[in-house]
Image: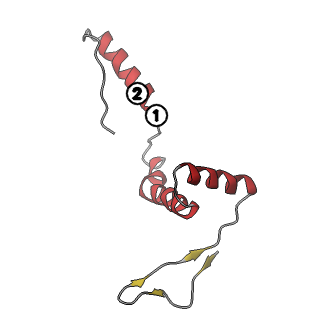
Amino acid sequence: MLITPPNCLYNKFVVFDRHFVLLYLSRFERQTLQREADQNQISPNVLVNQVLKRYSDWDRYENRIGMMPVPKAMLTSLIDKRLRQKGHPRGKVVLAV
């Protein structure tokens, strides 16, 4: 459900185009978001905006293009193992993130 104010919020020189969205969350979800926001020293609103931005920028395309998340430690271990099988000296694998 999208609730928008009658007009945008006005500043002296700048118009802020913001929309208010009402979310219904279970108590567990609300507490989880609040705890995570507190740990990162941000507001729950900022946290939700970060989550939604990540989803809209990347996560929604991930399944469509056949990608899946792989933990960095697992990927590093697999690459290191493969390099050793090929006869390369054991070295630290560095992944750019």
The image shows residue 11, relative to residue 20, as above or below, that is below
Residue shown at 30% from the left, 28% from the top: 94
The image shows residue 4, relative to residue 22, as above or below, that is below
Number of residue marks: 2
Residue 61 percent coordinates (x, y): 44, 52
Q: Secondary structure at mark 2?
A: helix
Spatial CA distance of label 2 from label 1 is 7 Å
Most foreground residue, 74 or 7: 7
The kind of residue on which mark 1 rests is: Val
- Taking the image as shown, residue 7 lies to the left or right of residue 89, namely right
Residue 6 percent coordinates (x, y): 56, 91
> In which quadrant of the rendered image does the C terminus lie?
top left
- Pointer 2 or 1: first along the chain: 1
> In which quadrant of the rendered image does the N terminus lie?
bottom right
Residue shown at 30% from the left, 23% from the top: 93
Q: Secondary structure at mark 1?
A: loop
Residue 45 percent coordinates (x, y): 55, 64
Name the residue that disc number 1 marks.
70
Residue shown at 56% from the left, 48% from the top: 39
- Taking the image as shown, residue 38 lies to the left or right of residue 11, namely right
Number of residues whose C-alpha sits closer than 10 Å to that of mark 2, classed few (under 14), some (14–19) or many (20 or more): few
Name the residue that disc number 2 marks.
75
The kind of residue on which mark 2 rests is: Leu
Most foreground residue, 44 or 88: 44
- Taking the image as shown, residue 18 lies to the left or right of residue 78, namely right
Q: Are marks 2 and 1 in contact (CB under 8 Å)?
A: yes
